[in-house]
Image (cartoon, helix red, strand yellow):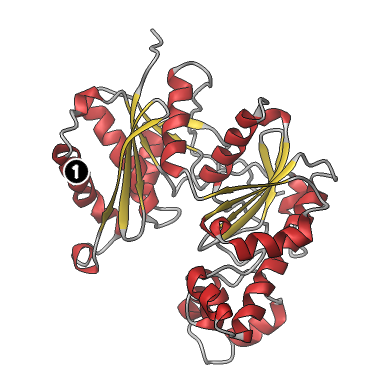
């Protein structure tokens, strides 16, 4: 029997924190960012070994806030380390749990969201869900092909927030997400810019493998031959090169910080290099938005700017000068990952959306 109200616990593990949120339908009861120090995580050899520690921290916070776990209708975990799959809300099954727990595909703490959610759900006899995990892949076949037959482009994107923003915008204008064509730019530590075609993310830059615009701590696209020369120069180890691409590159490499507020202050203090670097990043973002406009064949309802950097007036003003003639520009700053985990689960519980089944097989295996 469908109820009018559901209580959901959202669980979003990150590298040095575990964010949790308790929601009664769309209303947030409370949010907590449980921080984990280097000393806290040092005893664990593998990321997967942190499972019990993080679970205990979640239970401790719930107890401190006098939350009766039996009152929770479902648990929703961030997810990751899955075979690429379609977007949507998944009921966590044993196969999804095993893939996330083993981290055989990608070693990242976000996968523990699935593990913790299912263990809590099983213990208390409640369903557990995963909503639009990082492994969502809805690319058109044309978007996958490169000039080297052994290399295909992959969908690595802020899928959870991208989809949530699209759904929120559609609701705001009283339409369905599946009726719209949108370009969504999520700008934070990484920057993902996706073409949403009637509910599918048909193309996007790869935020892990060095595609698209540079970001606060990621290199973005760089010319292949100079990068190959750098790899064989003897100046860098393999891990150091990889770190330049998705950890220490971008604005961090140029200016020694990935904090946009600090960059703004540098510019305000007359630092010309800081302005050039920041402007270059904005220029590259604009070019990627243009590429997604082409992917949508010029049919775009709106360009939505989201993520933490969308709070920066300098960024919005500069970027708008490049893209304002493409389509309507909408600013929806911040991220809504905990909210997205809850809302996806509620849609399934209210029979507004059908839960998907994880089958552990990639949606694309090559030509």
Horizontal side of residue 60 vs 38, given as left or right? left
Give how far across and how far down residue 96 sits, in percent: 41, 38
Residue drawn at 37 percent across, 18 percent down = 5
Residue 149 visible here: no
Horizontal side of residue 351 vs 330, given as left or right? left
Question: Quadrant of residue 196 in the image?
Answer: top right
Residue 352 visible here: yes
Compared with 359, 33 (above or below) is below
Viewer-proximal residue, 188 or 56?
188
Horizontal side of residue 318 vs 294, given as left or right? left
Question: Quadrant of residue 58 in the image?
Answer: top left
Q: Circle 1 — which element?
A: helix
Give how far across and how far down residue 293 sits, in percent: 79, 50
Give how far across and how far down residue 62 sits, in percent: 19, 38
Viewer-proximal residue, 130 or 18?
18
Compared with 8, 220 (above or below) is below
Which residue occupies the extreme top position in the image?
A: 1
Viewer-proximal residue, 15 or 180?
180
Residue drawn at 61 percent across, 28 percent down = 171
**Which residue in the structure is indicated by mark 1?**
61
Question: Quadrant of residue 320 in the image?
Answer: bottom right
Q: Residues within 10 Å of mark 1 (few under 14, many from 20)?
A: some
Give how far across and how far down residue 270 sits, in percent: 59, 85
Assign the N terminus to one quadrant of the image: top left
Residue drawn at 58 percent across, 67 percent down = 215
Compared with 339, 208 (above or below) is below
């Amino acid at each position: 029997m469908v109820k009018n109200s559901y209580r959901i616990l959202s669980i979003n593990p990150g590298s040095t924190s575990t964010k949790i949120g308790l929601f009664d339908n769309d209303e947030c009861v409370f949010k907590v960012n449980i921080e984990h120090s280097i000393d806290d995580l040092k005893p664990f050899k593998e990321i997967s070994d942190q499972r019990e520690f993080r679970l205990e921290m979640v239970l401790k916070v719930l107890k401190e806030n006098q939350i009766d776990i039996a009152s929770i209708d479902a648990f929703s975990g961030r997810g990751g380390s899955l075979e690429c799959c379609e977007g949507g809300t998944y009921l966590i099954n044993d196969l999804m749990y095993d893939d996330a727990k083993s981290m055989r595909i990608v070693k990242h703490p976000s996968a523990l969201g699935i593990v913790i959610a299912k263990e809590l759900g099983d213990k208390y006899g409640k369903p557990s869900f995963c909503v639009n995990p990082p492994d969502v892949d809805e690319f058109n076949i044309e978007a996958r092909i490169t000039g080297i037959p052994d290399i295909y482009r992959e969908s690595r994107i802020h899928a959870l927030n991208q989809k949530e923003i699209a759904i929120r915008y559609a609701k705001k204008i009283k339409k369905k997400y599946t009726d719209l064509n949108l370009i969504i730019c999520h700008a934070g530590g990484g920057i993902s810019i996706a073409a949403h075609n009637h509910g599918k993310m048909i193309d996007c830059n790869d935020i892990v493998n060095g595609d698209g615009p540079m970001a606060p701590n990621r290199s973005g696209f760089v010319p292949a031959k100079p990068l190959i020369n750098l790899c064989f120069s003897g100046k860098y180890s393999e891990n150091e090169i990889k770190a330049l691409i998705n950890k220490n590159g971008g604005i961090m490499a140029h200016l020694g910080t990935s904090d946009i507020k600090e960059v703004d202050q540098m510019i305000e203090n007359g630092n010309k290099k800081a302005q050039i670097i920041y402007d270059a990043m904005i220029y590259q973002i604009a070019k990627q938005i243009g590429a997604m406009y082409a992917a949508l064949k010029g049919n775009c309802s709106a360009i939505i700017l989201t993520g933490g950097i969308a709070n920066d007036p300098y960024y919005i003003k500069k970027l708008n000068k490049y893209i304002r003639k493409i389509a309507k520009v909408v600013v929806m700053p911040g991220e809504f990952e905990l909210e997205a985990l809850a809302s996806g689960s509620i849609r399934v519980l209210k029979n507004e959306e059908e839960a998907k089944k994880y089958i552990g097989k990639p949606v694309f295996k090559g030509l």
